[in-house]
Image (cartoon, rainbow, N blue to C red):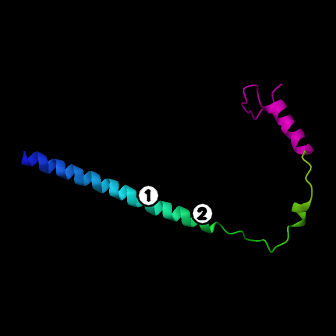
Amino acid sequence: MINNNRKAFHVLVGLALVVAIFALGYHVGQDKLRTKLATGGEVNGLENPIPEFLADDVEFDLFWQAWQHVKDFYVDDKGNISTEERD
């Protein structure tokens, strides 16, 4: 009977230790998350002007024509891509 009580005590102590370690890890993780959310990230490069090529409008017609050509001649009905032109 004493041996069973000792075994149960060891199991309970082990279980309490596991729960305590998990709770401590959870608490530390929540604190780090709160700190990160409160401080946020940094935005760099705001003082630099936008490069001229990024300010221009972009025309995608040529891209969509090429995409349609690839779909028409190199992709079958199941979506498989081939390096050989299909009919």
Q: Position of residue 25 (x, y in %)?
A: 41, 59
Residue nearer the viewer, 52 or 44: 44
The residue that appears at 72% across and 26% down in the rendered structure is 78
**Residue 50 lies in magenta, yes or no?**
no
What range of the chain is rendered magenta? 61-87
Q: Is residue 84 shown left or right of residue 17?
A: right
Amino acid at the residue labelled 1: Tyr
Residue nearer the viewer, 54 or 36: 36
The residue that appears at 90% across and 39% down in the rendered structure is 65
Q: Is residue 4 shown left or right of residue 82?
A: left
Compared with 16, 38 (above or below) is below
Q: Quick check: marks 2 and 1 in contact, CB under 8 Å?
A: no
When asked about the image quadrant of residue 16, the answer is bottom left
Q: Position of residue 51 (x, y in %)?
A: 86, 67
Q: Position of residue 44 (x, y in %)?
A: 73, 71
Amino acid at the residue labelled 2: Leu
Q: Earlier in the sequence, mark 2 or mark 1?
A: 1
Which label is found at residue 26? Answer: 1
Q: Dividing the image into 4 quarters, which one contains the N terminus?
A: top left
Q: Which residue is mark 2?
A: 37
The residue that appears at 76% across and 27% down in the rendered structure is 76
Q: Position of residue 10 (x, y in %)?
A: 19, 52
Say how many tags the image has.
Answer: 2
Q: Residues within 10 Å of mark 1 (few under 14, many from 20)?
A: few
